Image (cartoon, grey):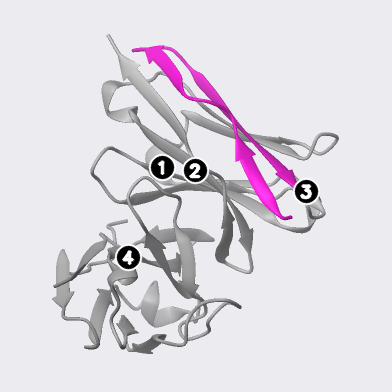
Amino acid sequence: QVQLVQSGAEVKNIGASVKVSCKASGYTFTSNSITWVRQAPGQGLEWMGWISTYKGDTKYAQKYQGRVTMTTDTSTSTAYMELTSLRSDDTAVYFCARDKNFVFEIWGQGTMVTVSS
Amino acid sequence: QSALTQPASVSGSPGQSITISCTGTNSDIGGYKYVSWYQQHPGKAPKVMIYEVSNRPSGVSNRFSGSKSGNTASLTISGLQAEDEADYYCCSYAPGNTRLFGTGTKVTVL
């Protein structure tokens, strides 16, 4: 079946980087973009950006410009989101989602990233 | 860009209908047909309930419906059921090929 499976929980120090993976299966990976969304504890959903799995084009939310990099490995149908210079307020669950015609129709299970000092 | 504005909470009794509003600007909701709604139960990933303002994905109950007027989109849940208790988020296409989520609404079934 169509699914996105994300990497496991991470604990990072302030100032470090984290790279979350999102492995797609059950469909042609390059047919749809991947969007990344995060949710801080007790807070709402926040769009971080998207990547075209076909061309590799990216678009990031202004808030994350310079700190986030989204990439893909088409040979393994995997998307990656790397966030650098981590701060305590980056503690959140990070989701990937298949972005089909501006609809986030399939979601990964989420990856908890905890940033502590 | 600021998040789209939703009421923090909406409640209703089983069988009733409720409506959740999502207010943006003519640069996002008012400018495009790409408004979607997501349901999120605690500890779970979101699930799309409505896309392109008023379309329901296969498998989503027809008790869920969407509409838009000007800069405000709405999600209506009719025949409210206990399983509908969850958080709901709207999302809109926004300038520069970006996306904007709403602030989220907690639906409580009394």
List the residue tagged with mark 2. A95
- Name the residue carrying label 3: A55
Q: Few, some or many C-alpha atoms within 10 Å of disc 2 (few <14, some 14-19, many ≥20)?
A: many
Q: Give the range drawn in magenta.
A: A1-25
Between B102 and B89, the residue placed more toward the observer is B89
Indicate the secondary structure of the residue bearing disc 1. Answer: strand
- Amino acid type at mark 4: Tyr
The answer to whether the residues at label 1 and label 2 have Cβ atoms under 8 Å apart is yes
Which subunit holds the residue at mark 3?
A: A
Label 3 crowd (10 A; few <14 / some 14-19 / many >=20): few
For label 2, the SS is strand
The amino acid marked with disc number 1 is Arg
Q: Is residue A90 magenta?
A: no
Name the chain letter of the residue that bears numbered label 1. Answer: A
Q: In which quarter of the image is the N terminus of chain A?
A: bottom right
Q: Which of the marked residues, 1 or 2, is nearer the chain's N terminus?
A: 1
Q: Main secondary structure of the magenta part?
A: strand
Q: Which of marks 3 and 1 is in front?
A: 1
Quarter of the rendering occupied by the C terminus of chain A: top left
Residue position for label 4: B88
Tags 2 and 3 touching, CB below 8 Å = no
- CA gap, disc 3 to disc 1? 24 Å
* 4 and 3 marks in contact (CB < 8 Å): no
Q: Are marks 3 and 1 on the same chain?
A: yes
Per the image, the residue denoted by label 1 is: A38
Q: Position of residue B13 (x, y in %)?
A: 16, 81
Q: Residues within 10 Å of mark 1 (few under 14, many from 20)?
A: many
Q: Earlier in the sequence, mark 3 or mark 1?
A: 1
Q: Residue at x 82, y 54 (%)?
A: A28
- Nearer the observer: mark 1 or 4; the answer is 4
